[in-house]
Image: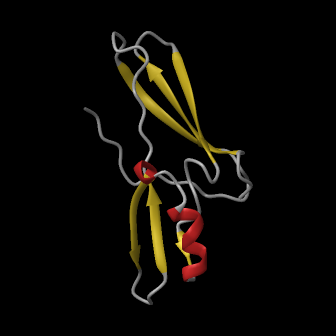
Amino acid sequence: MTKGKTAAKFIINFEDGSTEEFPLIAKVDVFDYWIHTKERREPIESLDADKIGWIGECSNGDARALTKYSWENPHPDKKVSHIDFEGGLSETAPFIVAITIE
């Protein structure tokens, strides 16, 4: 995954038919969740603390991690009808664990 490239993007669809796109940038907003050694944790721990959603271990002791991404609706007067999620880089397989709304 090359830092700075678009790993994926959210497309926010509003009820009025308009859209907003928000890219997830590789090694800035998202990273490889499969961490095999302690040495590979360092890039994750160098991310802004507010972007780290979870770091833990799987059953065989390898570390795993998830990022979190926040978005504030620039058009609070518009209602969101649905959200599309599109992958960007061919060497990544981004996925969503959860979406919450305040």
- Residue at image position (55%, 75%) is 35
Considering only vertical position in the picture, is 61 above or below 28?
below
Q: Residue furthest left?
A: 102
- Is 92 displayed left or right of 77 in the figure? right
Residue 44 found in image quarter: bottom right
- Is 13 displayed left or right of 98 in the figure? right
Residue 88 found in image quarter: top right
Considering only vertical position in the picture, is 84 above or below 7?
above
- Residue at image position (56%, 53%) is 30
The quarter of the rendered structure image containing the N terminus is bottom right
- Residue at image position (64%, 50%) is 26
Tell me residue 9's x, y (percent). Answer: 58, 38
Tell me residue 89's x, y (percent). Answer: 71, 50
Tell me residue 22's x, y (percent). Answer: 56, 31
- Is 16 displayed left or right of 22 in the figure? left
Q: Nearer the viewer, residue 28 or 58?
A: 28
Tell me residue 6's x, y (percent). Answer: 68, 43
